[in-house]
């Protein structure tokens, strides 16, 4: 199991129409084969500046690699992530 | 639900006896009331410098607050975390 997570902060104002549109569009990522337990999360710790997170799990690295090059993911990164995300950090976990 | 996570890097060499001792001692945190789904994780993304992670869930903020001041947690932070951790980042999530 690989748990792929990304914590991020949008350029949009909190509660804005643009913020909701970004999050709604990100739900298309759930459709990519191999994505399990997709979650949209709010980041609440005051010890970092991120405000949201996505988390998803793959059975193996092949699933994760296929996700990265899938047309839905590539389009989301190009059309929404790059123009609308102010800062982010990817963290990937496997069970010890 | 609050998912409390911390990504970190130890001062110890990978695979060392000291690394194993740290991780073994950290399992005591599972005993703290309110801690659910405690996980010890390996961080695998090349996009950050952390090598491990812990993840746990609490029903609510009161559970998380109680964990922070619990003697087992306070002792672990003082005796192991502060002297043995080189860098870390706490990220907390709630469901959107």
Image (cartoon, coloured by chain):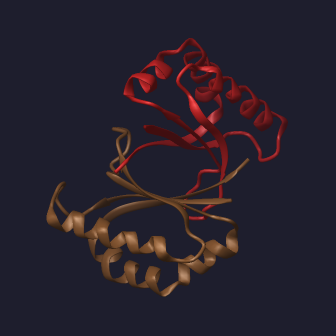
Chain colours: A brown, B red
Residue B5 vertical position relative to residue A75 in the rendered view, above or below: above
Residue B83 or residue A21, whichever sits in front: A21
Residue B17 vertical position relative to residue B53 in the rendered view, above or below: above
In x, y percent, where is residue B13? 77, 44
Q: Answer with the quarter of the image where residue A66 lies.
A: bottom right
**B55 sits left or right of B61 in the view:** right
**For the point 84% across and 35% down, which residue is it?**
B17
**A58 sits left or right of A87 in the view:** right
Visible residue check, residue A11: no
**A58 sits left or right of A23 in the view:** right
In x, y percent, where is residue B21? 78, 30
Residue A62 or residue B81, whichever sits in front: A62
Residue B83 or residue A18, whichever sits in front: A18
**For the point 68% across and 59% down, which residue is it?**
A1
Q: Residue furthest top?
A: B71
Q: Answer with the quarter of the image where residue B22 lies.
A: top right
Q: Quadrant of the N terminus of chain B?
A: top left
**For the point 60% across and 37% down, which residue is it?**
B37
In x, y percent, where is residue B31? 64, 21
Residue A83 vertical position relative to residue B93 in the rendered view, above or below: below
Q: Residue furthest bottom?
A: A71
Visible residue check, residue B70: yes
Residue A60 or residue A51, whichever sits in front: A60
């Amino acid at each position: 199991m690989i748990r792929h997570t990304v914590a991020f902060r949008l350029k949009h104002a909190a509660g804005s129409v643009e913020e909701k549109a970004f999050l709604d569009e990100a739900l298309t990522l759930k459709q990519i084969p191999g994505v399990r337990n997709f979650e949209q999360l709010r980041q609440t710790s005051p010890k970092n500046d991120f405000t949201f997170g996505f988390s998803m799990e793959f059975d193996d690295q092949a699933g994760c690699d296929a996700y990265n090059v899938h047309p839905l993911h590539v389009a989301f990164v190009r059309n929404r992530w790059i123009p609308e995300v102010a800062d982010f950090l990817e963290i990937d976990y496997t069970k010890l």
